[in-house]
Amino acid sequence: MIHVTRRVLFSASHRLHNPEWNEKKNYEIFDKCNNPNGHGHNYIMEVTVSGVPDINTGYVLDLKIMKRIIKEYIVDKVDHKNLNLDVPFLKGIIPSAENIVVIFWEILKDKFGENVKLSKIKLWETENNVIEYNGDPVKIKKFNDYIV
C-alpha cells in the first residue's frame, strides 16, 4: 500500500462556544477562544490517501486531481470564512479543530475514487496544536439553535 499526501493552507476564524453553558463556564473551558468576536488561524491541512499505483501511470492518485477535490469540497468553502457563520456544513457545531477534521473526513471520504482510500487528515490549527484523524467513528454534537 502506498500513501500519498497533499498539503493545503487556509485561513479562517471561529468562536468556541457551547450554547448550553453560561458565559462564565464557556470562558472557563474555552478561555480566549470564546471571544465573542471570534479569532482566526492560518490552518495547514494534510490529506493522505492510500492505494496501489496504477500500472499505466504509476499514480495512486494524480495529485492535480487530489488538489482539485480538496480545494472544491473544503478549501473554497472555508478559506477566509467565519466557520461559525459562513460554512453551512459546520452550522450548529462547535468548530474545534477536532470537530472540523471529522466533518472534513465525512465530506472527503468517498471523493477520491473506488481504488483510493482516504487514510488520514492532519490539521494544524497552530504550529503547536495538531489534530490527526483516521476515520474511526466519532460523535459530534449538533446544536439546533446554535448562537455564536
Image (cartoon, grey):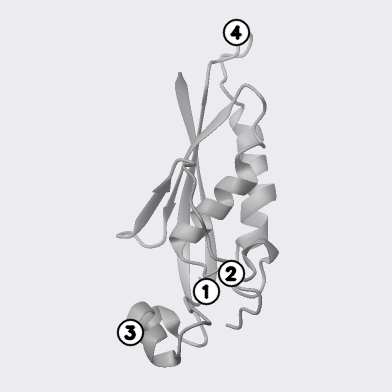
Q: Name the image quarter holding the C terminus.
A: bottom right
Q: CA distance from mark 3 to mark 1?
A: 17 Å
* Mark 4 secondary-structure assignment: loop
Mark 1 or 4, nearer chain start: 1
Residues at circles 4 and 2 in contact by the CB criterion of under 8 Å: no
Residue type for callout 1: His
Mark 3 or 4, nearer chain start: 3
Give left or right: position of 127 versus 75: left
- Where is residue 94 drawn, in percent x and y? 52, 70
Q: CA distance from mark 1 to mark 4?
A: 44 Å
Residue type for callout 4: Ile
Q: Residue at x 47, y 76 (%)?
A: 16
Instruction: Sort mark 1 into few (<14), some (14-19) or many (20+) by Cα contacts within 10 Å.
Output: many
Q: Which residue is mark 3?
A: 28
Mark 1 or 2, nearer chain start: 1
Image height check: is 147 above or below 126?
below
Q: Residue at x 67, y 59 (%)?
A: 77
Mark 3 or 1, nearer chain start: 1
Q: Which residue is mark 4?
A: 55
Residues at circles 1 and 2 in contact by the CB criterion of under 8 Å: yes
Indicate which label's residue lies in the foreground, 3 or 2: 3
Q: CA distance from mark 4 to mark 2?
A: 41 Å
Q: Which residue is mark 2?
A: 83
Q: Tell me the number on the disc at residue 14.
A: 1
Residues at circles 3 and 2 in contact by the CB criterion of under 8 Å: no
Residues at circles 1 and 4 in contact by the CB criterion of under 8 Å: no
Indicate which label's residue lies in the foreground, 4 or 2: 2
Indicate which label's residue lies in the foreground, 3 or 4: 3
Mark 3 or 2, nearer chain start: 3
